[in-house]
Amino acid sequence: SIPLGYFGGIGAASRRGILIKGGAVLDNLRDIRVAAFDKTGTLTEGVFEVNAVLPAPGVSREELLAAASLAESRSNHPIARSVLRAAQAAGSAPDGGAITDMREIAGKGVEVTADGAQLLAGNAALLEAHDITPLPVDMPGSVVQVARNGRALGALVVSDRIKPQAPGALEALRRLGVDVLAMLTGDRESQARPVAKELGLDVLKADLLPEDKASALEALGPARHTLMVGDGINDAPVLATAGVGVAMGGLGAEAAIETADVVILDDNPQRLPELLRIARRTRRIVW
Ligand code: ADP
Ligand code: MG
């Protein structure tokens, strides 16, 4: 095919909705051997559905759903959005007006003060950090544990779908010489493993805190060989660690977009092999 100069390469990419921040990025892309992915919103749609509402003994479904949706009402996390939709469908959508304080804890969940009560919604680690025993849940999916004033109210189970373009994109990356495909996720292993298996990934690191993702990536190879794809508010550090950091342009990902070397606007994983192909066709033009 026709070689492209830096401007040509950047232009060809931008016409496909791939924004490349400078010619050096194109050089770095030619040496990629390891491609690592965050799960949610990257390999999966990032649009969750609530599959189960599991109140603790003595708590009603309505009470659990109301507390969960109030806690999540100001969060942009895709899990939070699914909780809000489920509450709306059940006819109990909070407007969040009662909230006086809200903290988003990256990789864990949210902590909210509403009507003078402290509400928690997030994974088991979030409750444990507050010395609250989470409800035991033995179902596939991500679990949103909910507590009010130090007491567990129950849990919701949510799940996500693999993007239809993901399998083809990963195969194409392998054909382009990427020999390690990895998932680095904050989600729990039981939820991430079926996704990693279905996609034939070589490496799965789950239950990672945002700060652990960077060292997990470093363990996969020297920076010049690594590409990391993420989308979350919490993915900025690992995108900075990678030889090439790629952000998917989803909602609430401003920090990831700012840190990334490449931004994929349409969230389509097929853009990754396209990006590698464009980089290979690009040759430095000496004027
Ligand atoms: P991933 O690495 O898969 O994108 P995140 O780092 O965004 O996952 O989140 C990791 C885990 O933290 C989620 O799987 C979920 O259990 C929990 N979590 C984070 N934010 C929220 C929230 N707003 N509500 C419920 N759970 C949350
Ligand atoms: Mg994420």
Image: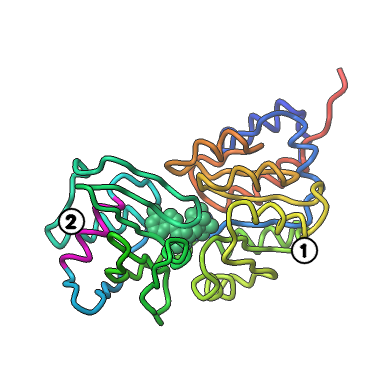
In the image, what residue occupies the spot 57% across and 65% down? Answer: 207
Instruction: Name the amino acid, label 2.
Output: Gln
Comes first in the chain, label 1 or label 2: 2
- Magenta-colored stretch includes residue 67: yes
- Magenta-colored stretch includes residue 114: no
User: 279 or 59: nearer the eye?
Assistant: 59
Q: For ligand 1, tell me if the residue under mark 1 lies within 8 Å.
A: no
The picture quadrant where one finds residue 2 is top right
Q: Which residues are magenta?
A: 62-72
Residue 275 rendering spot, x and y as whole percentages: 66, 44
The answer to whether 228 appears left or right of 73 in the picture is right
Q: CA distance from mark 1 to mark 2?
A: 45 Å
User: In the structure shown, which secondary structural element does the residue marked by tag 2 occupy?
Assistant: helix
User: 52 or 263: nearer the eye?
Assistant: 52
In the displayed orientation, state which residue is furthest to the left. Answer: 91
In the image, what residue occupies the spot 84% across and 30% down? Answer: 284
In the image, what residue occupies the spot 71% across and 50% down? Answer: 227
Name the front one of labels 1 and 2: 2
Instruction: Name the amino acid, label 1.
Output: Asp
Residue 1 rendering spot, x and y as whole percentages: 76, 42
Q: Which residue is mark 1?
A: 179
The answer to whether 272 appears left or right of 158 in the picture is right
In the image, what residue occupies the spot 59% across and 75% down? Answer: 197
Q: What secondary structure predominates along the stretch shown in magenta? A: helix
User: In the structure shown, which secondary structural element does the residue marked by tag 1 occupy?
Assistant: loop
Q: Which mark is residue 235?
A: none
Asked if one can make out residue 122 in the rendered structure from this viewpoint, the answer is yes
The answer to whether 3 appears left or right of 86 in the picture is right
In the displayed orientation, state which residue is furthest to the bottom. Answer: 138
Q: Which residue is mark 2?
A: 88
